[in-house]
């Protein structure tokens, strides 16, 4: 994918909104904040990248999508109507996406990292789940989550039951991760950082942009590349901006 930014345009990156978690009330407040952020960037956005776990759970039946998020969906629909490209990546919480975004909102959805060139700068962008060393349990489970037969079998469960089961699974997974206390910088053991270093040995990118870790990070990868983790919007409200020359991590306060 190639993007040429016009004068005064920027590209914006955000991930891990986890809309729907942990309850309706707090999710709606977060949704309102996300919409305010989208309103502040719409006049200078050359493109917006939503880099996974935008929803705490998402599953598309043939005629049904999860209840809620209508303000967010309406906002990104209006941004597309303005001609702003929006690129969506699935994460480990919303990997069961099909064609709703592409057909209804004209937003492409990518399940894997994507190579992008912006004004001659090379980016590798993705959510980050399942990459790098370790996390073997999740990698094993993901083979079932992404299996077409397993997804078809799940579709046979009534949405009221299936979505409730999946939401409980998502909540238990989040609680388990909190108990592991993994939301701290692991130094050289940061597995996404290790992944970027490995890729850089094979092919150069100026920026590696990922989410998933819930930690806003900017770390060197070799001499002229950087690994960026976008953080999250449950408590940090961090996002990335590329102005055609430089990349910055920023915090949305309002």
Image (tube, helix red, strand yellow):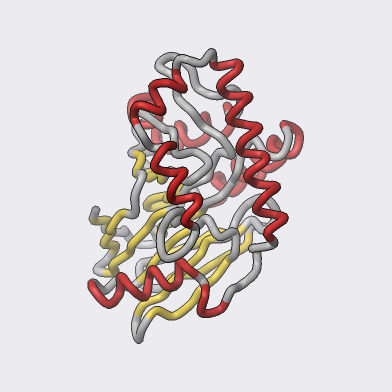
Q: Nearer the viewer, residue 224 or 21?
A: 21
Percent across and percent down for residue 190 are 51, 71
The picture quadrant where one finds residue 242 is: bottom left
Q: Is residue 245 visible?
A: yes
Q: Position of residue 44 (x, y in %)?
A: 44, 54
Residue 98 higher or lower than 129, as above or below: above
Across and down, in percent, residue 53 comes to 52, 45
In the figure, is residue 22 to the left or right of 143? right
57 vs 40, nearest the viewer = 57
Q: Residue at x 69, y 35 (%)?
A: 28
On the rendered structure, is 207 left or right of 252?
left
Residue at x-position 52% and y-position 29%: 74
How many discs mark residues in the rendered view?
A: 0
Q: Residue at x 47, y 46 (%)?
A: 91
Q: Where, by quadrant of the figure, is residue 122 drawn?
A: bottom left
Residue 254 seen in this snapshot: no
Q: Residue at x 51, y 16 (%)?
A: 157
């Amino acid at each position: 994918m190639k993007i040429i930014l016009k004068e005064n345009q920027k590209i914006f990156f955000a991930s891990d909104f986890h809309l729907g978690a942990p309850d309706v009330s707090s999710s709606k407040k977060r949704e309102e904040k996300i919409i305010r952020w989208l309103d502040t960037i719409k006049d200078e956005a050359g493109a917006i990248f939503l880099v996974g776990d935008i929803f705490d759970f998402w599953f598309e039946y043939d005629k049904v999508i999860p209840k809620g998020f209508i303000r967010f969906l309406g906002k990104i629909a209006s941004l597309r109507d303005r001609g702003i490209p929006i690129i969506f990546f699935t994460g480990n919480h919303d990997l069961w996406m099909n064609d709703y975004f592409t057909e209804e909102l004209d937003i492409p959805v990518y399940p894997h990292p994507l190579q992008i060139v912006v004004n001659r700068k090379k980016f590798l962008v993705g959510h980050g789940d399942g990459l790098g060393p370790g996390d073997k349990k999740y990698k094993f489970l993901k083979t079932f989550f992404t299996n077409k037969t397993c997804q078809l079998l799940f579709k046979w469960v009534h949405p009221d039951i299936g979505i409730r089961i999946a939401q409980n699974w998502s909540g238990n997974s989040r609680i388990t991760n909190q108990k592991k206390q993994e939301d701290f910088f692991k130094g050289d053991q940061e597995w996404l950082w290790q992944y970027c270093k490995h890729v850089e040995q094979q092919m150069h990118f100026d920026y590696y942009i990922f989410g998933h870790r819930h930690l806003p990070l900017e770390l060197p990868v070799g001499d002229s590349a950087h690994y960026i983790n976008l953080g999250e919007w449950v408590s940090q409200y961090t996002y990335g901006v590329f102005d055609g020359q430089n990349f910055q991590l920023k915090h949305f306060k309002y």
